[in-house]
Image (tube, rainbow, N blue to C red):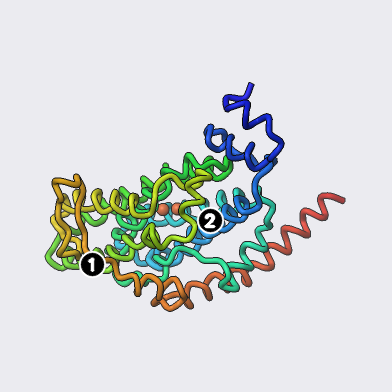
Amino acid sequence: MQPYSTTTTDTLDPEVHFQAKVDAEIRIEPKDWMPEAYRKTLIRQISQHAHSEIVGMLPEGNWITRAPSLRRKQILLAKVQDEGGHGLYLYAAAETLGVGRDQLLADLHSGKAKYSSIFNYPTLNWADIGAIGWLVDGAAIMNQIPLCRCSYGPYARAMQRICKEESFHQRQGFELLLSLSRGTEAQKAMAQDAINRWYWPSVMMFGPSDNDSAHSAQSMKWKIKRFSNDELRQRFVDMIAEQIKTLGLVVPDPELKWNEARGHYDFGPINWDEFWNVVNGNGPCNRQRLRARVDAYDKGAWVREAAAAYAEKRKQ
Ligand SMILES: [Fe+2]
Ligand SMILES: [Fe+2]
């Protein structure tokens, strides 16, 4: 017996049946019927997420050779490798929706598919690695924990594993900043500078305000999304406003203030012009990031060819 209303299962309309399953928190699996728009939304979202993981390896990978100690190098290497793994789980989840990985990568390389704009900012000093872990991975976790309950099974399952690793990423970033904040004046200034540059772009990672978000309402109805962009952003600001006290540093927002009546921190206006400018390809590193991905793909052609030839030989 299905645990949802028989009046809906009696109907032959597959869309009604689908929504009833979603409402009853029954996972949608690859072979189940799904509306075409649901499939397309998931392909867009999961691939965008996968691209963000592998493009996100670039700004941090930039510092692996320059990490200040072997311990820091090991941690950063492990973290960047995790991000590559996240990309793989997510491409595999997208493939269950009937789209090939070649197509997904072609869309990234042509600029048709997006990835998170945060990775179009440069990593200028060592403290940026801490700020990325604490703020960027911290914002990613806020966004991703609700995705562990996404209505689409393969995406939800991929996210459960990813979230465990992301929480390690956030802690290593915080620990790095904590060391710097307890160091020399120069180290403290370096940490503050990194926070000044990464704070607002991280706040923007939650996307446009709910009123301007094109896909939000439908994604909530399909239970792909559980909370609005603004709700998640508020949670993030509240978390960071508390954690920064331990660092003895400040966030670059003079309007950040606890609001007793709301039970949340109030914060200053977001520069949406900057947000859209970076989304539309004009951030500091958009071209550089895309070129690095295309180069990596081209240089890996011989590996793909050799693997395909080997697989063919084994078949014979
Ligand atoms: Fe990740
Ligand atoms: Fe991460």
At label 2, which amino acid type do we have? Gln
Camera-side residue: 233 or 19? 19
Tell me residue 264's x, y (percent).
21, 48
Tell me residue 84's x, y (percent).
51, 55
Q: Is residue 271 above or below residue 146?
A: below
Mark in the foreground, 1 or 2: 2
Q: Earlier in the sequence, mark 1 or mark 2?
A: 2
Q: Residue at x 46, y 54 (%)?
A: 216
124 relative position to 20: left or right: left
Dot label at residue 196? 1
At label 1, which amino acid type do we have? Asn
Q: Residue at x 31, y 50 (%)?
A: 172
Q: Are marks 1 and 2 in contact (CB under 8 Å)?
A: no
Ligand 2 is within 8 Å of the C-beta of the residue at disc 1: no
Q: Residue at x 68, y 56 (%)?
A: 99
The residue tagged with tag 1: helix, strand or loop?
Answer: helix
Callout 2 environment at 10 Å: few (<14), some (14 to 19), or many (20+)? some
7 relative position to 171: left or right: right
Q: Which residue is mark 2?
A: 45
Callout 1 environment at 10 Å: few (<14), some (14 to 19), or many (20+)? some
Dot label at residue 128? none
Tell me residue 31's x, y (percent).
70, 41
Outermost residue to the right: 316
